[in-house]
Image (cartoon, rainbow, N blue to C red):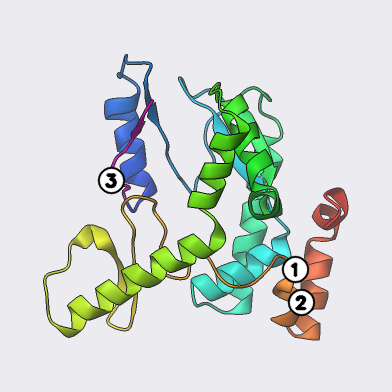
C-alpha cells in the first residue's frame, strides 16, 4: 500500500486540491490517500470513507483555548461549532463514516487501530497494530514536535533559511513548527489527560460549560 500525500500540506484547501486532481483520477488500488480536514464533508464523496472523533466538549474547549492561545468565549464558540460535526455525521451511512471516542485513541490505541484497519478494508494483525501504536504514542509525538521546535528556533536564531512548509506563521512571536511527514505542530499534543479541563477553568466557566453541553455530555456519558 502506498500512502499519499507524501508531504503533508498545512491547509484543508490543499488537501481538497490533491483529492480532486490526484486521488479521484488515480486508478491504482494500491495507492491510498489520507486527508485531514476541518470541514464537514459531503455524504457521498466517491472513493472515500470518513473517520471522525467524539470528544468531551469541555476537553475540546481547553484544548482549543491553549493551542490557539485564545480566550474562554472564543474557545467556547469553537467547541459549540464542533458539535455540528457529530450531529450531521450521525445521519450518514455507517459504512461511510466511523466515529471514535477521542480518549480511546490514547487509552485503547491498539483496538482503535484494528477498528480503523477493518473499516477501510485493510487486514492487519495484532502485532502490526502494536507497532503502529508504539510508533505514534503520545510521548513519541511530544518528542517529535519538541525536536522540530528546537530545529526551528535554531534556524531563526542563526538566521538560516526556513522552508515555508516547516512553519505555521501567525506573527513575529506566534508561530509553530510543522512536521511535513505527520502534520503535527508545536503543542499539538499536550501533557494534559482527558478530564483535566476541570483544573483549567474557573467555577463560573465550568458552570457555563456544563450548561451549554449538558445534552451532549449526558448522551455520551462524559
Q: Which numbered disc, 3 or 2, marks the residue closer to the eye?
A: 3
Residue 176 seen from this side: no
Q: Is residue 136 left or right of residue 195?
A: left
Marks 1 and 3 close (CB-CB < 8 Å)? no
Residue 103 placement, left or right of 150: right
The disc at residue 87 is none
Marks 3 and 2, the one that precedes in the sequence = 3
Number of numbered discs: 3
Image location of residue 131, percent across then percent down = 52, 43
Residue 185: percent from left, percent from top: 40, 63
Q: Is residue 38 visible?
A: yes
Residue appearing at x 55%, y 21% in the figure = 121
Residue drawn at 83 percent across, 76 percent down? 207
> Residue 126 sits in which quadrant?
top right
Q: Are marks 3 and 2 in contact (CB under 8 Å)?
A: no
Residue shown at 61%/26% (left/top)? Answer: 118
Disc 1 on helix, strand or loop? loop
Queried whether the magenta region covers residue 6, the answer comes back as yes
x, y percent for residue 163: 17, 62
- Magenta range is 1-9
- Element type where label 3 sits in the image: loop
Front-lying residue, 120 or 74: 120
Numbered mark located on residue 195 in the image: 1
The label on residue 198 is 2
Give x and y (percent) for residue 89.
65, 36
What crowding class fits label 1: few (fewer than 14 Cα within 10 Å), some (14-19), or many (20 or more)? few
Residue at the disc numbered 3? 7
Look at the picture and state if 127 lies above or below 221: above
Amino acid at each position: 500500500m502506498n500512502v499519499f500525500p507524501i508531504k503533508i500540506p498545512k491547509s484543508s484547501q490543499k488537501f481538497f486540491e490533491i483529492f480532486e486532481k490526484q486521488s479521484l483520477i488515480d486508478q491504482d488500488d494500491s495507492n491510498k490517500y489520507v486527508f485531514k480536514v476541518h470541514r464537514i464533508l459531503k455524504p457521498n464523496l466517491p472513493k472515500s470513507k470518513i473517520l471522525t472523533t467524539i470528544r468531551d466538549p469541555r476537553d475540546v474547549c481547553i484544548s482549543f483555548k491553549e493551542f490557539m492561545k485564545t480566550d474562554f468565549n472564543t474557545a467556547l464558540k469553537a467547541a459549540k461549532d464542533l458539535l455540528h460535526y457529530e450531529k450531521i455525521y450521525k445521519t450518514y451511512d455507517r459504512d461511510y463514516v466511523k466515529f471514535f471516542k477521542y480518549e480511546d485513541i490514547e487509552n485503547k490505541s491498539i483496538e482503535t487501530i484494528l477498528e480503523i484497519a477493518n473499516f477501510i478494508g485493510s487486514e492487519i494483525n495484532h502485532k502490526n497494530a502494536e507497532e503502529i501504536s508504539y510508533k505514534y504514542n503520545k510521548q513519541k509525538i511530544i518528542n517529535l514536535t519538541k525536536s522540530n521546535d528546537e530545529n526551528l528556533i535554531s534556524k531563526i536564531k542563526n538566521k538560516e533559511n526556513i522552508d515555508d512548509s516547516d512553519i505555521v506563521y501567525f506573527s513575529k512571536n506566534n508561530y509553530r513548527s510543522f512536521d511535513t511527514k505527520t502534520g503535527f505542530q508545536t503543542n499539538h499534543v499536550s501533557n494534559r489527560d482527558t478530564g483535566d479541563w476541570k483544573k483549567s477553568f474557573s467555577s463560573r466557566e465550568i458552570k457555563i460549560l456544563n450548561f451549554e453541553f449538558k445534552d451532549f455530555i449526558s448522551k455520551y456519558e462524559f
